[in-house]
Amino acid sequence: MKRRNVEKVKSDYTPELGKSKQQLYKFAHRRVHSSIRKGSHIEAIALLESIMSDRIESAISSLTRQPVSASSLGSLFRLLDKLSPADENLKALVWDWNESRGLVIHQMVKLTNDHNSTWAERVKFARITAQEGLILLPQLRRYSDRIIRKARKS
């Protein structure tokens, strides 16, 4: 992957891209599980967010038939929820996980007035967040797949 100063948008589907996507998902899922086993929870969380964001981008693109700019999980989910509302349980799970993800990714070494904890407590929280991401992912995928199937029929 090369860094470029070009806006990143989701690629249009082609059978070749579909095969590439399958391979990326296969390796990402393997890496998530191995990262959790090895205690590399931050890596697992980052990969889970990437998978979740990709699924949401696909659903948005299916609904709007427009290119979707790469963005954060929260921004993407907010847009998809406006286009095709999620049930309240899924919304709560996504928002809670996204907040936990942000704490793990951005606050591991920061001390704030409401987040003073030991390293061991923070690692435990990261492990729980990674495991919760594994539980959330199939729920989010069912939601996005349902939207994609419905949009393709339209």
Image (cartoon, helix red, strand yellow):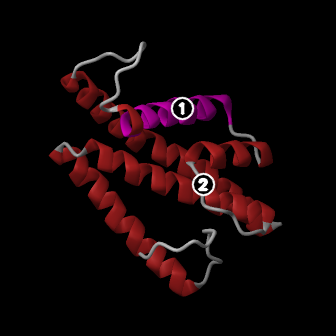
Task: State yes or no: residue 126 in magenta.
Answer: no
The residue drawn where x is 52% and y is 74% is 4
Going by the numbered disc 1, the residue's amino acid type is Leu
From the image, which quarter does the N terminus lie in?
bottom left
Tell me the magenta residue range.
87-105
* 10 versus 104 height, above or below: below
Image position, residue 68 (x, y; %): 69, 64
Give the quadrant of residue 126: top left
Which labelled disc corresponds to residue 93? Answer: 1
Helix, strand or loop status at disc 1: helix
Instruction: State the residue position of label 2.
Output: 71
Image position, residue 109 (x, y; %): 30, 31
Circle 2 or circle 1, nearest the eye: 2
Residue at the far right: name it.
154
The residue drawn where x is 48% and y is 34% is 97
- From mark 2 to mark 1, how far is it between C-alphas? 19 Å
Image position, residue 107 (x, y; %): 38, 32
Task: State yes or no: residue 104 in magenta.
Answer: yes
Left or right? Give the position of 55 relative to 151.
Answer: left
Q: Is residue 149 visible?
A: no
Residue at the far top: name it.
113
The residue drawn where x is 47% and y is 80% is 19
Left or right? Give the position of 54 relative to 84.
Answer: left
